[in-house]
Image (cartoon, rainbow, N blue to C red):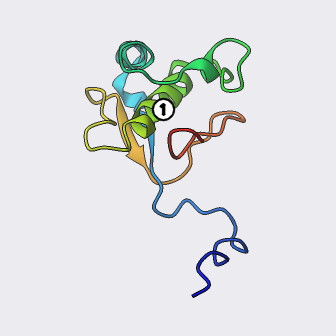
């Protein structure tokens, strides 16, 4: 079997990958509360959404919450219930795009 080289020639794919993003319909207050939780006791890596960091722009609650929610979700191995935040988030199967920010698909990417 030549399994080790089968991935090399193929373009990057999002097949089988999932991300957690903010539900804009939840409202800014709910998103902000969930963002505060994710970046605080939730343990998400929120360094990339701090002023001057690579994912700070666009400077919106939705964009910052999406990054934080996805960090939390990936850090918790995409486990069931780790992308809800009381209705403030949901799972998507296409890579989210906010400015030039890349969202990790696993913790450590």
Q: In this view, does 3 lie above or below 70?
A: below
Which image quadrant is residue 108 in?
top right
| Residue occupying image coordinates x 25% and y 26% | 86
To which residue does mark 1 refer? 71
- Expressed as whole percent of the image width and height from the top left, the position of residue 85 reads 30, 27
| Residue occupying image coordinates x 45% and y 17% | 39
Which image quadrant is residue 1 in?
bottom right
Q: In this view, does 24 lie above or below 52?
A: below
Q: Is residue 8 above or below residue 28?
A: below
Q: Nearer the viewer, residue 109 or 20?
A: 109
Dot 1: few (<14), some (14–19), or many (≥20) neighbours within 10 Å? many
| Residue occupying image coordinates x 36% and y 13% | 33
Left-right relation of 23 to 53: left
| Residue occupying image coordinates x 50% and y 44% | 106
Could you tell me how many numbered marks the image carries? 1
Q: Which of 78 and 97 is in front in this view?
A: 78
- Expressed as whole percent of the image width and height from the top left, the position of residue 105 reads 53, 46
Which image quadrant is residue 2 in?
bottom right
Q: Nearer the viewer, residue 64 or 11?
A: 11
- Expressed as whole percent of the image width and height from the top left, the position of residue 101 reads 67, 34
Q: In this view, does 55 lie above or below 21?
A: above
Quadrant (top left, top right, bottom left, bottom right) of the C terminus: top right
- SS type, badge 1: helix
């Amino acid at each position: 079997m030549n399994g080790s080289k089968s991935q090399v020639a193929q373009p990057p794919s999002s097949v089988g990958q999932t991300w957690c993003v903010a539900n804009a319909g939840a409202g800014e207050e709910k998103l902000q509360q969930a963002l505060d939780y994710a970046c605080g006791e939730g343990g998400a890596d929120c360094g990339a959404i701090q002023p001057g960091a690579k994912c700070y722009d666009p400077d919106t609650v939705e964009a910052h919450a999406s990054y934080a929610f996805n960090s939390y979700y990936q850090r918790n191995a995409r486990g069931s219930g780790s992308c809800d935040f009381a209705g403030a988030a949901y799972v998507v199967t296409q890579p989210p795009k906010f400015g030039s920010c890349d969202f990790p698909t696993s913790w450590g990417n």
